Image (cartoon, rainbow, N blue to C red):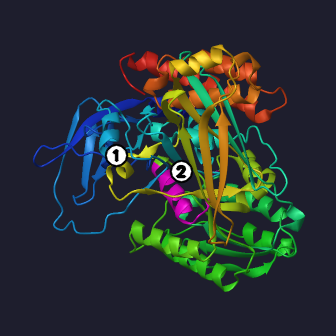
Amino acid sequence: MKATCHILFFLILNLSLFSQQYYVRGEVKDEAGNVLQNVTILQHKTGYVFKSGSAGTFGIISHQQIDTFSFSYEGYRTEKVIVNADNYVSVKMKLAPSSSSNVKRDKLSSLTKDLEKEEQKRWFSGDETYASLLENHFVNAKRFPTTGLSLNVDRASYSNIRRFITLNSLVPPDAVRIEEMLNYFNLNYNEPKDASLFDIKTTLSSCPWNPANHLYYINLSSKKLNLDTLPPSHLVFLIDVSGSMDMPNRLPLLKSAFRLLVNNLRDKDSVALVVYGGITGIMLNTISGGEKEKILKAIDELTPGGTTPGESGVKLAYSVAKNHFIKGGNNRVILATDGDFNVGMKTEGELDELISQHRESGIYLTCLGVGMGNYKDSKIQTLAKKGNGNFAYLDNFKEAEKVLLKEFTQTLYTVADDVYMNVEFNAEYVKEYRLVGFDNKVGALRDTMSAIEGGEIGSGHSLLALFEITPTNACNDAIADEVKSGKFADIKLQYRHPNNATLFNMNHECKLNFIPSKELDKNFHFSAAVAMFGSVLRSSSFTKNVGWNEIIALAESSSTADDLLQKEFITLVQQAKLLYSKVKKKKGAGTQY
C-alpha cells in the first residue's frame, strides 16, 4: 500500500510538472549585431518549429524551464542553444563557409496587383511573437483595386487547432489559417447551374467585430461529380511506417483511415501500397479496387520500425503511379505521415522539384498528416501544393471518416486545377479592404521572386472568402437610400480542367446589394464567428476588442441544431476560452499569446 502511494505521488508530481508552462523570449542577430528575421527555431523536445519576427525576436511556449533549441538560417551555421526560461536569450548567428546554395522560393497565398513588397513591409510589427505568417492589412482600393487569391480545398488547420485545444495546449499562431478553418465546414453550397463548373454568389453585410465596416462574403461552389460515372482511379497509398509512427494516433489511426477509403473503391479502380521506414518497398502490387480483402489484409499487416527514408518512398510511389497511369483517369499518390519527413541527401528544393515534375504529368498528391507539430504541418502542406493536391490533418478517427468517407469525392476527385480568383473593387464604394485569411509567409513577401499560383478544387466543395470593407460615404449613402444598383466589385475566376492545359475564365459582376445583419443567412453569421475565432487565436490587431463570449454568442445564435460540426465548434471555443483565460491569469495580462 505504501509503495502504491509513492507511485501515485510521483505520477501526480510528473503530471503537474508537465502541465506547467514557461515562456522563452529572446532575439537573433548576426555577428555584426544586425537582427535576423524569419530564422527557423527548432524546439528539440516537441519537434515544433517557430520563426523569429521582423525585429529578430521570438517568444515560445515551453513545458520546461530548461529547454534546448536549434537556430538555422540560409547562409549561416546552425546554432544549438540550451536556454533558461527565466533569462532573455540572445543568439548570435555566424556565417557559413559557403552561402552560394540555391534559395527556395516560397509561393504566395494572395497577391494585390501593383502593391509593392516594400510597402507591405510596413505591415510588419516588431512586437509580434510569431511572424512566419504575416496577416493581411487594409489596402487602399483607389490605388490597388485588384487582389488575387489562390484557391484550394485544404482544411488541415482546423483539425490541427482542435488537437491543440483538446490537449489543453496553446495554439501556435502560425498554425492558424483562417481560410482553411472556413473550408472545413463547407458552408452555403450552391449547385452550379446547367453545365457550369462553378457557382459564384456574393453578399455584403455589416462586420460583427467592427460595426463601422462591412463584411463581404464571396461564396464559390464547385460542381458535384457522380461517383458512379467518375473515370477510373489509380491510387498509390504511400504510408510512413518508420519508428516514429508507433503511437496510437499515428499508424493505427492511418490504417483505420485507409480501411474507410477502401470501402469507396470500385472494381474499375486500382490500388498499390508503398511503404517507407525500416525498408522502402511495394507491399501490394497494383490490383483492382474490387479485391478489398487483399487490400485490407496488406494494410492490416503494416508494422512500424526503422528510420524515415522519405525521398526513396516518394520516388518509388511516383514510379508505380507512372507505370500504371490511367489516361483520362484520376491518378493520385496519397502520402500519409507524421511529418518526420527525411528526404535523404536531397534538399527540400530538390524534393519540391521532383514532385512538381510529376504534377505536370497529371499525377496528383494528397497528404494526410497525423501527430504533427506546426513545422511538419507547413512542410507537408508545401508538398501538397507542389503536387497540385490537397492536405488534411487527421487528429482522430472521426476526422478520418469525414475526410475519406463523407468527403471522399472532395478529397480525391479534382474538378479544376490552378484555380485562381481576382477581385477588383469599385473605389466609388470601397475606401479600403482587407482580405481575411490567405496570409502570406514572411519569407515569400520578402522574396522578390515569389509568385502566386492557383490550387486544386475538389468535387462538391463550397469555399468562402471574406473581405473586411471600409466603405466610402457614397457607399453608406447608397445603403441608407436602399440603392441596389451600381457595381461593387468584379470577380474573375481562372482555372484549368484536369489534364488540360487550356485556361478558362469565368466573370462575375457584383452589384451593391447590402443585406442587414438581421436578414442575413445564418451560415454567414457562423462563418464570421469562425473567422473571429481564428483571428483571436492569432492575436490579430483587427479583432483585439473581441471577447470569447462574443464569438460563442454569435456561433450559438447562428448554428443549426442538428449540425454536429457546428456544435463541436462551439464546444471548442468554450474550451479555448477556459484555456486562454487560465494562462492569462497565470502569466499576467501583459504577456502575448
Identify the residue under disc 1.
116
Nearest the eye: 175 or 215: 215
When the figure is inspected, residue 352 is found, relative to residue 128, above or below; the finding is below
Tell me which residue sits at (53%, 55%) in the image.
381
Nearest the eye: 537 or 122: 122
Which region is colored magenta? 375-393
Query: Exactly how many numbered labels are in the figure?
Result: 2
The reply to whether the C-beta atoms of the residues labelled 2 and 1 are less than 8 Å apart is: no
Q: Is residue 352 left or right of residue 186?
A: left
Disc nearest the viewer among 2 and 1: 1
Nearest the eye: 176 or 398: 176
Q: Is residue 578 visible?
A: no
The answer to which image quadrant residue 517 occupies is top right
Q: Is residue 56 left or right of residue 297?
A: left
Mark 2–mark 1 distance (CA, rounded to whole Å)? 35 Å
Tell me which residue sits at (20%, 42%) in the image.
35
Judged from the image, the secondary structure of the residue bearing numbered disc 1 is loop
For residue 483, which numbered disc appears in the image? none
**Mark 1: amino acid:** Glu
Judged from the image, the secondary structure of the residue bearing numbered disc 2 is loop
- Asked if the stretch drawn in magenta spans residue 401, the answer is no
Tell me which residue sits at (51%, 58%) in the image.
453
Q: Is residue 310 left or right of residue 491?
A: left
Identify the residue under disc 2.
372
What is the chief secondary structure element of the magenta stretch?
Answer: helix
